[in-house]
Image (tube, rainbow, N blue to C red):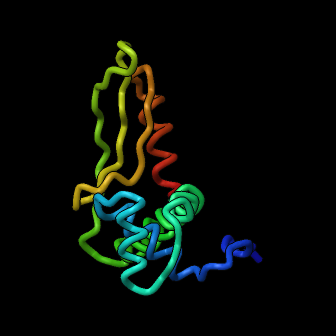
Amino acid sequence: MAKNPFRYFKTSPEIIHLGVLMYVRFPLSLWNVEDLLHERGIDVCHESVRLWVDRFGTYFAHKIRKRRSEAMRRSPQWQWHLDEVLVKIRGERHYLWRAVDHEGEVLESYVTKTRAKAAALKFLKKAMKR
């Protein structure tokens, strides 16, 4: 059984979820999120919101991505394709491989230095696992 990620926090998971999503989803500062939560009767410090975003941001993103991909796989029109882009990182050319769904959402990405069949197959296997 997985441990509860909220076990050391006195604030309820629903409030943490609301604060993190407000900060991530909308272009708000930590102080704006603090003010919005205060208007709803929730008294938290902006530093608490920052801690929640650092600690639970990836956790919530993973849950949303997983729920969305499961719903999309049940849908008959769900499709995705492999996309390759040439990018420069610190002046060096690299290849960015992306799995993109029919709505334009990036499902997975992978960066390689070479544009080879082996690199494409490695990324394809990684994308198919997820």
Q: Decide if residue 62 is in sight here.
A: no
Q: Decide if residue 50 is in sight here.
A: yes
Q: Quadrant of the N terminus?
A: bottom right
Q: How many marks?
A: 0
Residue drawn at 28 percent across, 58 percent down: 27
Residue drawn at 35 percent across, 65 percent down: 32
Does 74 appear above or below 59?
below
As drawn, is 91 to the left or to the right of 7?
A: left
Image-quadrant location for residue 102: bottom left
Percent coordinates x, y for residue 11 in the rendering: 61, 79
Residue found at the far bottom of this picture: 41
Residue drawn at 46 percent across, 40 percent down: 123
- Choose between 44 and 84: the one closer to the eye: 44
Percent coordinates x, y for residue 93 in the rendering: 35, 17
Does 98 appear above or below 64?
above
Percent coordinates x, y for residue 55 in the rendering: 59, 59
- Choose between 101 and 87: the one closer to the eye: 87
Image-quadrant location for residue 78: bottom left
Image-quadrant location for residue 96: top left
- Choose between 5 and 41: the one closer to the eye: 41
Does 111 appear above or below 126?
above
Percent coordinates x, y for residue 23 in the rendering: 39, 63
Residue drawn at 46 percent across, 50 percent down: 127
